[in-house]
Structure formats: C-alpha cells, structure tokens
Amino acid sequence: MNMQALAALETRDPAVRESALMAALPAQVRAALAVPAMAERLAGVDPDTVNSRAALALLPVTRKHELLERQQAQRASSSFGGYSALGWNAQRALRPARRVFQSPGPIYEPEGFADDYWRSARALRAAGFHAGDLVHNSFSYHLTPGAWIMESGALALGCTVFPGGVGNTELQLQAIEHLRPDAYCGTPSFLRILLEKAAETGIALPSLKKALVSGEAFPPSLRDWLATRGVQGFQAYATAEAGVIAYETAAREGLVLDEGVILEIVRPGTDDPLPAGEVGEVVVTVLNPDYPLLRLGTGDLSAVLPGICPTGRSNTRIKGWMGRADQTAKVRGMFVHPSQVADVLKRHPEIVKARLVIEGEMANDRMTLRVECAAPPAGLANAVAASVRDITKLRADVELSAPGSLPNDGKVIEDKRSYA
C-alpha cells in the first residue's frame, strides 16, 4: 500500500474532500438501487440528484434491527436480506463474497475482495504500525469479522500477522515471548490480561510497544496504565457493517473520520441531522458498492469536534463512543421510544429540544418532559402534555426551560428509576 497516497488524502483541504465525497454519492446510490432491499427503500430516488448532504439527509436511515428483521424474513433466499451485492450461487448475488460473518442476532455480513476491504490500514498507520512489523492479532477469528478487519489492514501495510484469536492466555503469552511482536490488535481488556499475566509469571515483553484496540471502551486510565508498561495504545471505532469509521491519532484529541466515510449525527429516534457539536446517533454512508448501506444507523452516540487534528489530518473528528442511541424504556407496561419524543416535538415546532425523564420506583413511575423553548406561548405546557398522552398513551408533566438548559449528552429518554 502506498503510504504517501494515504497521507495525501488525510491532509487534503477539507473543501476538496467534501467535494470528492459528494461527487461520489450518485454512484453509491446507483449501487444501492442495484440490490433489492435498498431499491425498495429508495423507490423513486434519482441517484443524480443525491449529490449533497441536504439531499442525502432526505433518504431513510437504515438501522441494524431492520437488517436483522429482513434477514430473518428472507433466510431461505437471501442471507443478507437483499442488502448486499455479494453472496454465492444460492444467493443469486451480483458478485461472489470472499467471506461471510455472523454477528449477534444473528446478523450476517459479507466481505469483498478489495484490498484492505474494511479500511483499517489508515487506523493502524496512525497507531504507529509499519511495514515489517509483526502484529499479534487477538481479535476473534471465529464467526465475527473483528480479526479479519485488522488483519486485512495490517497485510496491506506490509506487516506480518500472528493470528492469536481470543482466549488461551498462556499460549498467547508464550507466543509473544517467543516471537517478540512489535504490535498488538485486540480488545484493551485482553491486552491488560496479557500484561498482568506476564508480570505475574516474570515474563518480559520488551518488544511490544504499540497497540490498536477496539470492541470496548478505552478510558484514559487504561491508556495510561498501558503506557506505564511501555505500550502506546490507540483506539479504532469500527462496526461489522461499516468497517473502520474513525480512529485515534497521536494527538489524543478525539477520533479522526476515515476517508471513505460520510458522517452524520442525527437526533436519536429520528433521521434528522443535528447541528455540529450536538450529541446524537452516529449515521454513516460508506463508499462501498459491495454493501451499499446508505445512511447506516450505528446505534452509537457521539458528537463532532470543532477544528482539525493537530497531526495535520484534516478530516472531521468525533468525540468517540458516548453511549447507545436506543433509549427505549418501559413505563407502566408500555414501551416509550425516542421516536415518540421526536413526534411530540414535530407537533410543537417552537420547542428547541426535549428530554423525557422517568423517575420513581417500578410500578410507581412518573414521567416529566423537560423542553427548551425561547418564548413559550400561553398554554404550551398543557398542549405538550396532551400530545405526550396522545402519542405514548401515558401521562407526563411538562417543564419549560430556556434554550441551552438541557445537557448536551444525546439523551432523549433518561431513566432515573430505582431497580433495587
């Protein structure tokens, strides 16, 4: 892989990058229209008109539960639910898949033949991986794509890979002692287990200096713990459907978006983009014609950071994982969804933002909808309460407050009940 080409893309003028991404959108829409599930979702869409963020935002968000539901309904004919151009003979696919993976659900995901299919090389490079490094890969090679995501990028960089997989701590530690790898890929918790076991048994691991971790939260405390033991750990944000979405750099200031990803942050429970800086659900469009999931809702919360990375990488940065967007709660036997809170706001456009707070003990719940409104008209609280009743079939108090008073944490429903 050409490292100079990687670096050149990462430091492009943001306007040049944005122009290139928007110019690539129509072709991605055409790829989506070529697979049955997306063709249904995009019925009537002219791909040539989808050449801006505003036009993209008019398309529906596809969420993981929809992938699962369609796959379950079409198991006999389409393992990918009609969302992928890849498959095998029985799937009547446009092109053959290299591998097929299973994630919890189960949801099945394809892998194509493109070099560095999951786009992890850029994240590995930012973590200090180089051609000739030996990489100890402790992601699972069984069922899920985690190990293959990292291996494909490491091979594209010119690294050698030891497929450690998960578990077998003693054997993996023995391999690290014997082979002296330069780098580690895997979960941060397993890396900690390996280092603690090495310390317990008196095994020195002087070669292991860098790590790219994913699949779990990577708090600064654990990052610093690793550093005191000679390992510089960096994190990547990836999903089985989208591959690598964003990655950490030496600046340690958020995660830089991958060059092949168009990012939106949407209000939880809706398809509506939020202003920069607001916390919401991460929605991505990956420029991948093999698996053309336009506007994939990851279910994760994050927010865009202002400015560019101090390393010179000019792409958008996000804060990293900030929780889950699905905040559905059950109140008095009824499910309450973030989308229902969004429906209340649509009925009352003078409301800027809202947060449904559920308090009390189970079976003695009380709901309060806290709303921001600059100049509330007379009777707004009563009208909003009536809308909540109409939409959720539950009663709620309504509290009015000034814009900016609610926390910017992406929560639409806050469950504060005691479950003791």
Image (cartoon, grey):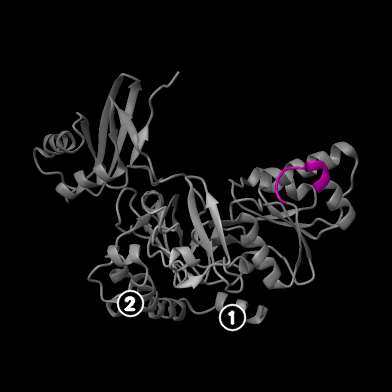
Q: Amino acid at mark 2?
A: Asn
Q: Which residue is mark 2?
A: 51
Q: Amino acid at mark 1?
A: Ala
Outermost residue, left direction? 378
SS category of the residue bearing label 2 = loop
Q: Position of residue 291 (x, y in %)?
A: 45, 66
Query: For the magenta stretch, what is the residue range?
Result: 165-172
Closer to us: mark 2 or mark 1?
2
Q: Residue at x 41, y 54 (%)?
A: 76
- Along the line of sight, which residue is nearer the eye, 255 or 372? 255
Alpha carbons under labels 2 and 1: distance apart? 24 Å
Q: Is residue 177 left or right of residue 341?
A: right
Taking the magenta stretch, the answer to whether it contains residue 69 is: no
Q: Which residue is mark 1?
A: 8
Report if residue 348 is visible in the image.
no
In the picture, the quarter occupied by the N terminus is bottom right
Q: Residue at x 81, y 55 (%)?
A: 208
Report if residue 224 is visible in the image.
yes
Write down the quadrant of residue 276 in the picture: bottom left
Q: How many marks?
A: 2
288 above or below 169? Answer: below
Q: Is residue 217 left or right of residue 264?
A: right
Q: Residue at x 49, y 79 (%)?
A: 13
SS category of the residue bearing label 1 = helix
Q: Position of residue 54 (x, y in %)?
A: 29, 69
Q: Residue at x 65, y 67 (%)?
A: 153
